[in-house]
Amino acid sequence: MTSYTAPAKDIQFTLETVCDWSSINALPAFEEATHDLMTAVIEEAAKLSANVIAPLNRIGDLEGSKLVDGTVKTPAGFKEAYRQYVDGGWNGLSFNPEWGGQGLPFSLALAVQETWTAANMAFSLCPMLTQGAIEALDHHGSDDLKAIYLEKLVSGEWTGTMNLTEPQAGSDVGALKTRAEPNGDGSWKISGQKIFITWGDHEMTENIVHLVLARTPGAPSGSKGISMFVVPKFLVNEDGSLGKRNDVKCVSLEHKLGIHASPTCVLQFGDEGGAIGWMVGDENRGMRNMFTMMNHARVNVGLQGVAIAERAYQQALSYARERVQSADLMQPNKGGVPIIRHADVRRMLMTMKASTEAVRALAYYNAAAVDRAHGCESDEDRAAAQGLADLLTPVTKAYATDLGVEVTSLAIQVHGGMGYIEETGVAQHFRAMPASLPFMKAPTVFRRWIWWAASCLWPVVPIGAICSRISVILLPICPVRAIWGRSHLIWKMALKPCKMPLCGFRAMMHPKRAIPPVGRLRSCVCSVL
């Protein structure tokens, strides 16, 4: 069984209870996001993901994207599926109606994104990065840049990319060498090479909008001297039509362990005189601007762990129901039974199911905090919600992706020897998940990021506020006081070190000191959610 059915009821339940959908709907910004609308959106997304996007998952893995005559060609069916996605208005769910979006909550858009990702992770990466580019331009771009690019990006007619990494500059982005020279007319000449650019080139849309980090003349060294530029594949004329090809090209594709349909490009800027770009925001503030895009991506990368875990669970469950092997221990003389009757298989399946639901709750709760940070009326409420979102974002990314790897590994174990055979399809999920671990920071670097977020946000997000919110979620659905008490205690233990004075922060940044509290946070999430 390699098909996919979106868990619509589980998704709706999480939105209703963990996110407290009624309170989100009560916010002035989301008063049109009724329960009926939320349900209808999830049901329609489930249809598109199951009937159109999911069938391309195996095809994309086998064919992969290919670089042909300087242009990336996607696997059969991808361009047509993307056209249906765009025609349905799916790309603009949570964006500003001023640019053609629908203005719905981010938590609903994230739930919809789960269905695309579970159906076909390689496909889902394209709109995910486009949406991050929209966030960056909407927050930091000039009015002129917004007028040129946002409507096309929000509709999905054009796609966007994130260009940070270079051969010598991975997690240490400040080591980048890409240069930006002023042209004297407000534009800049960009030259350099970027690697690991997801969906950096393709034929699914007319234009691709690259957000590129580069260093201007005389800029300070390190990350403080980085600026952001928008560099389109095709230049845009004053009337909005496409002009000549810009000096940016894909010179090669990476050969990856998984997600073969998603082209991971090496992009060369300025081989023929310089790619033309325009600065986004202020000079030397590129990293700040890029973090807007990166934080959007981090929540979505965490969601990849949820989505692939769900897909792997569905496949393992189907196999366990069909595969007959060995007699039931309680009825040894009755012949073979489906392996789902065996205790250890049931243990693995229940572990997969419980873990997936826990990180789904975490990711959606994270998204609901983003909604409240934008939609609450008082400054105090918005600040508290933003602080919570800032704290949860690195936890969501780190924990959910780790757990996705664990769940896909269990899926292979449920299949036994057949799990190692490509034809069963479960190995594809296992190969896809490791890509999410280093994406938006390597795990070892991310532990330090979690500690930084927790330490700096402690004055904004006190433990009492977090525990109070958890109690609101838990008590109606978790009457067993022993479970609640243990979860409450673990959460306090996990965040207690965050109250340390700043003088102790450097010591706590040491990897050996950072890992245990991060583990406590993981335990808390499992126990609570």
Image (cartoon, helix red, strand yellow):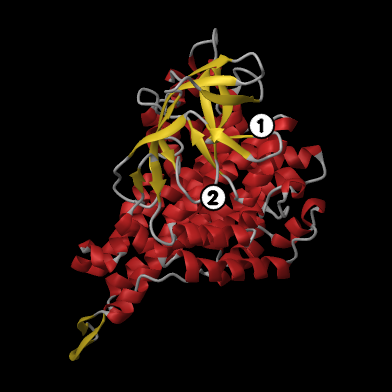
Horizontal placement of 279 versus 98: left or right?
A: left
- Along the line of sight, the residue nearer the viewer: 137 or 288: 137
Mark 1, mark 2: which one is toward the viewer?
Answer: 2
> In the rendered image, which residue does mark 2 sit on?
127
Q: Is residue 502 above or below residue 414?
A: above
What crowding class fits label 1: few (fewer than 14 Cα within 10 Å), some (14-19), or many (20 or more)?
Answer: few
Helix, strand or loop status at disc 1:
loop
Q: Is residue 133 left or right of residue 77?
A: right
Does the image show residue 252?
yes
Picture layout, residue 420 above or below residue 223? below
Label 2, secondary structure: give it. helix
Q: Position of residue 170 (x, y in %)?
A: 39, 28
- At 22% from the left and 82% from the top, the residue drawn is 329
Tell me residue 119's x, y (percent): 45, 63
397 relative to 60 in the view: left or right: right
Specify whether 84 is left or right of 164: right
The answer to which of marks 1 and 2 sits earlier in the sequence is 2
Residue at the top extreme, as displayed: 218
Residue shown at the point (66%, 25%) measured from the top left: 281
- Quadrant (top left/top right/bottom left/bottom right) for the N terminus: bottom left
Q: Position of residue 159 (x, y in %)?
A: 55, 45
Front residue (pair 196, 307): 196
Quarter-wise, where is residue 44 in the image?
A: bottom right
| Mark 2 closeness class: few <14, some 14–19, many ≥20 residues within 10 Å | many
Residue 355 visible? The answer is no
Identify whether 221 is placed above or below 460: above
Residue 459 circle label: 1
